[in-house]
Image (cartoon, helix red, strand yellow):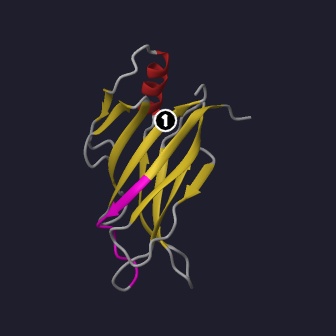
Amino acid sequence: MVEFIGMIKVNVVKGINLAVRDMVSSDPYAILTLGQQSVKTRVIRKNLNPVWNESLMLSIPENIPPLKVVVYDKDTFSYDDFMGDAEIEIQPLVTAAQAHERSEIHESMQLEKSVEDKENTLEKDGLITVVDGKVKQDLSVQLQNVETGVLEIEIECLPLTQ
């Protein structure tokens, strides 16, 4: 049986300059997977810069895997087209949330930074911050295995003791 240590709330904010998969546009949606769990955003019709602003919840397993994001173009009469993917390491966010939970400090602050480099899919550095007692990370993620596309995502870690 899988033990869970908390939850993450992932707000899929928007896509930027996504790949064309239909004649002149695409109908994108995103699937987020953490371990054996998957959740999906709604489809935004005919838009290469979709704004989802959709919050999805996933349980964090004890052995923390990366958060996987795959974007597809919804097709009615054929298989959905692949529009890119990304992996996001959430371990630093979970560690920061656990440390903050044990802390006596309850003011807003920056805890850590995930730095953009060739080893990850970050478009720019992702700061882990505490705002109003919530441990969050705002990320701009370059989609992989596709010619173009960026996703903006906000992740909040909710330890089980809350």
Q: Count the marks: how many?
A: 1
Task: Specify the quadrant of the image occupied by residue 105.
Answer: top left
User: Looking at the image, is 135 positioned above or below residue 142?
Assistant: above
Residue situated in front as seen by the camera: 119 or 53:
53
User: Which residue of the protein is positioned furthest toward the top in this rendering?
Assistant: 104
| Quadrant housing the N terminus | top right
Percent across and percent down for residue 91 are: 46, 32
**Residue 58 visible, this angle:** yes
Percent across and percent down for residue 15 are: 35, 62
Q: Is residue 81 left or right of residue 79?
A: left
Badge 1 density bin: few <14, some 14–19, many ≥20, Cα 10 Å: many
Q: Which residue is mark 1?
A: 157
Q: Is residue 21 left or right of residue 17?
A: right
Percent across and percent down for residue 114 are: 32, 35
Q: Residue at x 44, y 77 (%)?
A: 45
Q: Secondary structure at mark 1?
A: strand
Q: Residue at x 33, y 84 (%)?
A: 24
Magenta span contains residue 73: no
Give the residue type at disc 1: Cys
**Residue 34 visible, this angle:** no
Percent across and percent down for residue 134 are: 44, 32
Q: For the magenta stretch, what is the residue range?
A: 12-22
Q: Is residue 100 left or right of residue 35?
A: left
Q: Residue at x 34, y 72 (%)?
A: 48
Q: Residue at x 30, y 66 (%)?
A: 147
